[in-house]
Image (cartoon, rainbow, N blue to C red):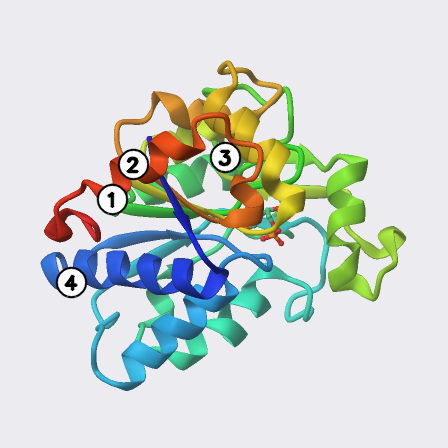
Amino acid sequence: MEVIIVKSAAEAARKAARIYKRMLDEKPTAVLGLATGSTPLKLYSELVRMCENGEIDFSKATTFNLDEYVGLPEGDPNSYRYFMDANLFDKINIDKKRTHMPCGNADDVNEHCAEYDAKIRLAGGIDLQLLGIGADGHIGFNEPTSSLTSRTRIKTLTKQTISDNARFFGGDPDKVPTHAITMGIGSIMDARMIVLLAFGENKAEAIKAAIEGPISAMVPASALQMHKNVKVIMDEPAASQLRLREYYDWVYERKPEWQKDA
Ligand code: F6R
């Protein structure tokens, strides 16, 4: 796991955007795993800016999002499809037919989830997966005690996640759906490369547990310790509880320049 601590979320976004650019330059047909929430917003703005300037090309890329709420009507402004269209897909040169989200209104949820995993496999697997992290250590909506080998399925959100996400629903936790379809931890671990972004002090405890704690289903993000190509890019407040903080900086300062965006 590569731990990169930067001064601000904006710097992290620029760094992550360079990783996307490099991926798409090398493999224009790359399969990108995407996330929603507050964390990726600056990265998405940076990707939009780069696309407008002709610095990055999404025209042959395919995307799969991590998760979607269950039960929101189609076109609901709180659905993750709406979020992705508004913050990224409508602003870049991607073919919308190649952007995939779990469907929160599938008639047969189990069948839909199995199909979602199959579609990812058929597309050749995810080349670069973007993740945020919940204050409880979740990735996707894999809440604590999720199986570390889980595949795409329906999950019940914890009260903490519901209250954390109430800000998107006018502050009312009762409006937040209680269930979501999420790629499993096993599905996420299949990605060839993973970039996790974390900003703010309320992520510090989860980041410490994920990076330096034991691997445990109680901290789903700790499964990433078993992945061979993960970069965790965070700001200072998110890094504030890391015990080996100085070592991470020491390692990063000694990386050859060419390796930094790899
Ligand atoms: C969203 C997702 C979640 C979020 C996490 C952090 O697609 O998979 O795991 O990344 O809940 O949310 P924010 O970024 O809003 O703090």
The residue that mark 2 highlights is: 250
Q: Is residue 208 above or below residue 67?
A: above
N-term-proximal mark, 3 vs 1: 3
The residue that mark 1 highlights is: 253
Q: How many labels does the image show?
A: 4
- The residue under label 4 is which amino acid type? Pro
Any mark on residue 170, and which?
none
Real-space Cα distance between discs 3 and 1?
A: 38 Å
Tell me the residue at 72%/37% (across/down). Answer: 157
Q: Is mark 4 within 8 Å of ligand 1?
A: no
Say if mark 3 contacts mark 1, CB within 8 Å: no
User: Looking at the picture, how far across and down is residue 16, in whole percent?
Assistant: 34, 57
Query: Is label 3 or label 1 in front?
Result: 1
Q: How many other residues sit within 10 Å of disc 1, few (<14), some (14-19) or many (≥20)? A: few
Q: Front-most of 148 and 248? A: 248
User: Looking at the picture, how far across and down is residue 105, in whole percent?
Assistant: 65, 52
The residue that mark 4 highlights is: 28
Tell me the residue at 19%/56% (across/down). Answer: 23
Q: Is mark 4 on a helix, strand or loop?
A: loop
Q: Seen in the image, is 224 located left or right of residue 192?
A: right
Query: Is label 3 or label 4 in front?
Result: 4
- The residue under label 3 is which amino acid type? Thr
